[in-house]
């Protein structure tokens, strides 16, 4: 089974490499992901590039290096990091704390797991999260600078990074804030965030994913049994509310294209890394494994094959639609990217498919 998923993950990686990876502005030693396929000139010139999508591309490259270590891929990881910083005006930071958190996670993993280290970047990003913690304002850290929206998409990944970057106490404070503030008392799912004291009640798959990732990290790194209990509760809530027929729910294209992949990534972390102390731990790991593998089977079965390589659907239970360069393109609106007319055109959707194949490989490898 393990080799099957390794082969599928390798196919997903090859599809991204062929359709999306390109030098940034023809600069040697750089690479970024073109955000649409088929692409148009503005995309190939990286007029549009989506910082946080590139962070997930980097994270997927690290997954692939873990699965199949190759010197050539280590170079791709280094090129991706250089391309990111160059396109971001020679900086690591931007105005969105969730964006920066995703890059921080990917850079930390690139250093620890793939040997491409950027310690100064990690320290720069770490300071951003530590200095934006404002319990006196009701947070949490905000979604973006000069904003009063405190949400799971910023606090979850920032705290995962801080837990791994030896800032355990702050990561624990952030996990307690999330648990006290954003858990739905009825379903036990994670709400999106809190704005001016009012709950934003949307429940997104990736919010569940980052809280699972955070609580699993803390269960591994602390003696506090509460973190594992939160994992048990949330895995069950995801199973019961976000995975009809056992397949993680999709959220279309644009930014939403990444949501189901992120949940799959952190379910795989639960499946492989939640410490096993009792039957509840084993049950959570088992449920997480099943959700990943059922989703991955569906996504693989519903893919299209173009030039011998997979094209994944935005909704894993549906057959993928092959996109063209015509039709409505993804637009950046009020801090978020909406979907292309055919969501399969968006790099985000294809990255989520790749992420899912790597997650399936990880859980089948244990």
Image (cartoon, helix red, strand yellow):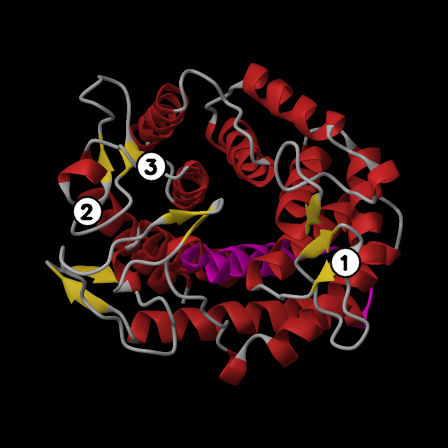
Are the two marked residues, 3 and 2, in contact with CB atoms closer than 8 angstroms? no
Tell which circle, 1 or 2, labels the residue nearer the N-terminal end.
Answer: 2
Q: Is residue 258 magenta?
A: yes
Q: Is residue 192 magenta?
A: no
| Left or right of 108 on screen, residue 320 | left
Q: Nearer the viewer, residue 141 or 261?
A: 141
| Left or right of 86 on screen, residue 329 | left
Q: CA distance from mark 1 to mark 2?
A: 43 Å
| Residue in the picture at 41% in, 43% down | 53
| Residue in the picture at 30% in, 33% down | 32
Q: Secondary structure at mark 2?
A: helix
Q: Residues within 10 Å of mark 2 (few under 14, many from 20)?
A: some
Identify the disc placed on residue 309. none
Identify the disc placed on residue 198. 1
Q: Is residue 316 above or below residue 331?
A: below
Q: Nearer the viewer, residue 113 or 299?
A: 299
Task: Please name the predominant secondary structure of the magenta segment in the image.
Answer: helix
Relative image position of residue 4 (x, y in whole percent) = 34, 64
| Residue in the picture at 70% in, 40% down | 159
Relative image position of residue 223 (x, y in whole percent) = 88, 47
Q: CA distance from mark 3 to mark 2?
A: 15 Å
Which quadrant of the structure image shows residue 68?
Answer: top left
Q: Which residues are magenta?
A: 256-279
| Left or right of 240 on screen, residue 321 | left
| Residue in the picture at 79% in, 62% down | 230
Q: Is residue 175 above or below residue 242?
A: above
Tell which circle, 1 or 3, labels the residue nearer the N-terminal end.
Answer: 3
Q: Secondary structure at mark 3?
A: loop
Q: Nearer the viewer, residue 225 or 155?
A: 155
Relative image position of residue 192 (x, y in whole percent) = 66, 58
Q: Which residue is mark 2?
A: 19
């Amino acid at each position: 089974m393990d080799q099957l998923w390794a082969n599928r993950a390798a196919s997903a990686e090859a599809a991204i490499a062929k359709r999306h990876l390109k030098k940034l502005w023809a600069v040697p030693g750089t690479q970024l992901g073109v955000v649409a396929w088929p692409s148009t000139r503005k995309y190939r010139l990286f007029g549009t590039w989506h910082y946080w999508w590139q962070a997930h591309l980097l994270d997927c490259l690290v997954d692939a290096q873990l699965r199949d270590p190759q010197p050539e891929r280590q170079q791709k990881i280094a090129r991706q990091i250089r391309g990111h910083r160059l396109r971001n005006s020679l900086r690591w930071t931007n105005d969105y704390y969730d964006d920066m958190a995703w890059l921080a996670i990917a850079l930390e993993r690139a250093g620890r797991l793939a040997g491409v280290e950027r310690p100064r970047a990690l320290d720069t990003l770490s300071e951003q999260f530590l200095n934006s913690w404002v319990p006196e304002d009701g947070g949490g850290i905000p979604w973006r600078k000069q904003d009063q929206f405190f949400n799971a998409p910023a606090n979850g990944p920032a705290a995962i990074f801080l837990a791994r970057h030896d800032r355990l106490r702050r990561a624990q404070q952030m996990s307690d804030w999330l648990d006290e503030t954003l858990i739905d008392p009825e379903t036990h799912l994670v709400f999106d965030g809190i704005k001016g004291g009012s709950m934003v009640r949307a429940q997104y798959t990736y919010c569940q994913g980052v809280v699972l990732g955070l609580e699993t990290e803390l269960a591994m790194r602390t003696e506090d049994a509460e973190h594992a209990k939160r994992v048990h509760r949330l895995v069950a809530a995801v199973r019961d509310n976000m995975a009809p027929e056992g397949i993680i729910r999709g959220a279309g294209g644009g930014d939403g294209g990444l949501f189901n992949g992120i949940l799959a990534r952190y379910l795989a972390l639960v499946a492989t890394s939640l410490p096993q102390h009792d039957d509840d731990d084993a049950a959570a790991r088992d449920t997480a494994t099943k959700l990943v593998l059922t989703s991955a089977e569906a996504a693989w079965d519903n893919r299209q094959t173009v030039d011998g390589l997979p094209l994944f659907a935005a909704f894993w239970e549906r057959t993928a639609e092959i996109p063209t360069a015509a039709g409505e393109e993804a637009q950046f609106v009020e801090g978020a990217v909406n979907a292309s007319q055919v969501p399969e055109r968006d790099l985000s959707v294809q990255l989520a498919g790749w992420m899912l194949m790597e997650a399936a490989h990880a859980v089948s490898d244990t």
